[in-house]
Amino acid sequence: MAKPTELRFGILGAGRIVTKLGGASRLVRGAKLIAIASRDLERARARAAEFGVGNYQALLDDPEVDVVFNTLHNGLHCDWTVRALETGKQVICEKPLACTVAQAQRMFAAAHTNNRKLMEAFMYRFHPQITEVKRRVDAGEIGEPLYLRSSYTFHGRERDNPRYWPNAGGGALMDVGCYCVNLSRCLAGSEPTRVMAQAHFDETTDVDLTLNGSLVFDNRLTAQFSCSFEAENSWAAEIVGTNGKLAIPHPWLPPQWPAQFVITRDGKDEVVRVEADSVPQHVLAPFALEIEHFADCVRNDRPPTFPPGTDAERDSLANMRVIEALLESARHDSADVRV
């Protein structure tokens, strides 16, 4: 069968990310966003008037759509991703992939059964700065890594947002702490053996508004992170080793190009600037690189990998196991949960 020259994308959901994905798709050759689906058709039309608009099932049934981008709230990721795979669509699903490990396993099982690709949308991992940070840490430029700190906190979620709904996979850990968990595991190059967490749970909804977590790895590296819906803006990461440290001011979505991070050794700073090669240098480039990678995997029938080279399925399942363990620790006030 001939490989498709242009992959046509449809988006499940009409949230703010539609604008980002629409802009990013224009930066990628051979990928075109053609449709969005929403329960609120007027909202969808207002969000993206230039695209076809319909309900969820209509998008899955549309033969013109090759790839579905599932941007629905976390509680709808599993069911609608499985449905999309069963109708023959390739699927990119927003992070976190699922609400539980069991759901994530069900989703990948559907991908294998239907011979389709499934990838979790951690766009930050496709930014070339993460590849360069990982390369330098692995090369020993800061010595043996000892501890890592990261944060993703902010104010401003509306109280009627699904991020506050327990049955929608709400909470700070699921929404933004998943980034910190993912980066910690990426830079550690291994999986944590134990985790600990403390959280402030909302009295009304019982979702975590703030969570502080620790991941303990066998190679004596420890990672600490903070995520919150109720704290002042903070998004940064730092990994400290025996011979230096590396600080990433904007690990999740750098606001400028070239992106930059700082390596400090013997009190001297080296500013490292990282540019993109295959797409225009634009704030939406990580989304574009994510789409570009997935399109290449579909065309060439290869499994998705997260740069720098981690098998995407294994990574998604492992990330979900750590998230589940952190929530168990926080909810049961357990000081030490095995992963």
Image (cartoon, rainbow, N blue to C red):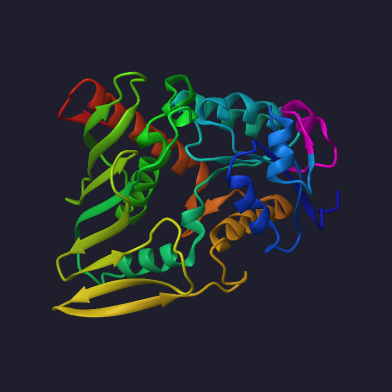
Residue 80 percent across, percent down from the top left: 64, 27
- The question of residue 238 being in magenta is answered with no
Asked if 334 appears above or below 255 in the picture, the reply is above
Q: Quadrant of residue 68?
A: top right
| Quadrant location, the C terminus | top left
- The question of residue 59 being in magenta is answered with yes
Horizontal arrangement in the rendering, residue 242 relative to residue 281 (left or right): left
Residue 64 percent across, percent down from the top left: 84, 42
Asked if 27 appears above or below 217 in the picture, the reply is below
Asked if 58 appears above or below 284 in the picture, the reply is above
Provide the residue span drawn in magenta. 53-67
Kindly tell me whether residue 121 is visible in this rendering: yes
Q: Quadrant of residue 281?
A: bottom right
Residue 83 percent across, percent down from the top left: 68, 26
Horizontal arrangement in the rendering, residue 262 relative to residue 252 (left or right): left
Q: Residue at 71% of width from left, 42% of height from top?
A: 46
Q: Residue at 30% of width from left, 28% of height from top?
A: 327
Residue 196 percent across, percent down from the top left: 20, 34
Kindly tell me whether residue 115 is visible in this rendering: no
Query: How many numbered marks, from 0 up?
Result: 0
Horizontal arrangement in the rendering, residue 247 relative to residue 18 (left or right): left
Q: Residue at 27% of width from left, 36% of height from top?
A: 211
Q: Nearer the viewer, residue 268 or 100?
A: 268
